[in-house]
Image: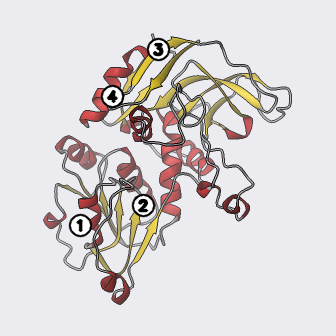
Amino acid sequence: MRALVVTAPGPRGTAAVTELPDPRPEPDEVVVRVTSCGLCGTDMHVLGGELPVVGYPLVPGHELAGEIVAVGSAVRDRAVGERVAVDPNMPCGACHYCRIGRGNLCEDYTAIGVTRAGGFAELVAVPARCCHVLPAHLSEAAAGLVEPLSCAVHGLNRLPRRPGEHYLIYGAGTMGLMMAALVRTAGAASVSVVDLNEERLAFARSFGVDAAVTGADALDRAPGFEVVIDATGVIAAIEDGLGRVRRGGTFLQFGVADPARGASFSPYRVYSQEIDIIGSMAVHNSFQPAVDLLAAGLDLDPLVSDVYGLDDFEEAVARFRAGTGRKIHIAPQKG
């Protein structure tokens, strides 16, 4: 089979399309023929060597979907021919956090496309338990969006979700707009988005947000917002957003910030105005709900702007880093 292999990390990473042996499933695994796999910021960290859990060489790609083409001898609940989205997260099941039902905080983290071979390949072996069956009518774009949507669903589940509240979201990329779509379905009175990228702001307006601006000062909400969500990880955005939360409101840290940097805020204001600050990490009991939302008609297909084959991976990465377009998918079967 053909696969994109990162052989060494670095500022640009060293990656090449390589011929590898076709995977064979372990007794509890299936082999998936990958039809779509999203390009994500985590993949940039893999290329850059910024994740200490990664061992090289590695086939990255964790937002994957495809068709089962082989099943292991012990698999009973999955079958050849089923179309599936794959939850890449593999908590150990034995640590303190797994035992108390918080597997997304697992102390012995492993994941498809991060610590073991992922979806930027024609074929990949994955645990059968990670596979969620997709309905036949679901588009290929939607199939590749299940994993990031499941992260957004978990973020939504961390919020109080009181109908009629006003939301402010920093970041008009894929994740910010997924959050915008979800909070709208959860009863938001208004959803405003802040981003510096004019192309993304224009798309956000077409996607149905109430306001899309380059700075929150342009929004006429002097009391602030009941819910502010950071989907950027940018310290300046986080600091600004914390100042936009109204009394009794909630700030959700959803974007991935640089772990070496801190943000300034007023602890007294958090105390005196009873502001809740919440974090959301990856996926937690939210993968199947993401499948169900898409199957029921949540239309996120417009978020996918580009589909590249394996041979065009370098071009896809350049487009991702330039911040042009929206969600980029890699289709390993594409010629």
Which part of the image, by quadrant, shows the N terminus?
A: top right
On screen, 100 above or below 293? below
Q: Earlier in the sequence, mark 3 or mark 2?
A: 3
Identify the residue position indicated by label 2 in the image: 183
Identified at 17% across, 66% down, the residue is: 219
Identified at 32% across, 86% down, the residue is: 268
Identify the residue position indicated by label 4 in the image: 12
Pair 1/4: label in front: 4
Identify the residue position indicated by label 3 in the image: 17
Pair 3/1: label in front: 3
Q: Earlier in the sequence, mark 2 or mark 4?
A: 4
Residue 24 seen in the current view: yes
Identified at 38% across, 27% down, the residue is: 13
Whether label 3 touches label 1, CB < 8 Å: no
Pair 3/2: label in front: 3
Q: State the CA–CA distance, disc 3 to disc 1.
A: 42 Å
Amino acid under label 2?
Val
Q: State the CA–CA distance, disc 4 to disc 3.
A: 16 Å
x then y, percent, for residue 102: 64, 61
Identified at 66% across, 49% down, the residue is: 91
Identify the residue position indicated by label 1 in the image: 240
Pair 4/3: label in front: 4
Amino acid under label 1?
Asp
Q: State the CA–CA distance, disc 3 to disc 2.
A: 40 Å
Q: How many marks?
A: 4
| SS type, badge 1 | helix
In terms of depth relative to the viewer, which is nearer, 330 or 94? 94
Q: State the CA–CA distance, disc 1 to disc 4.
A: 31 Å
Pair 2/1: label in front: 1
| SS type, badge 4 | loop
| SS type, badge 3 | strand
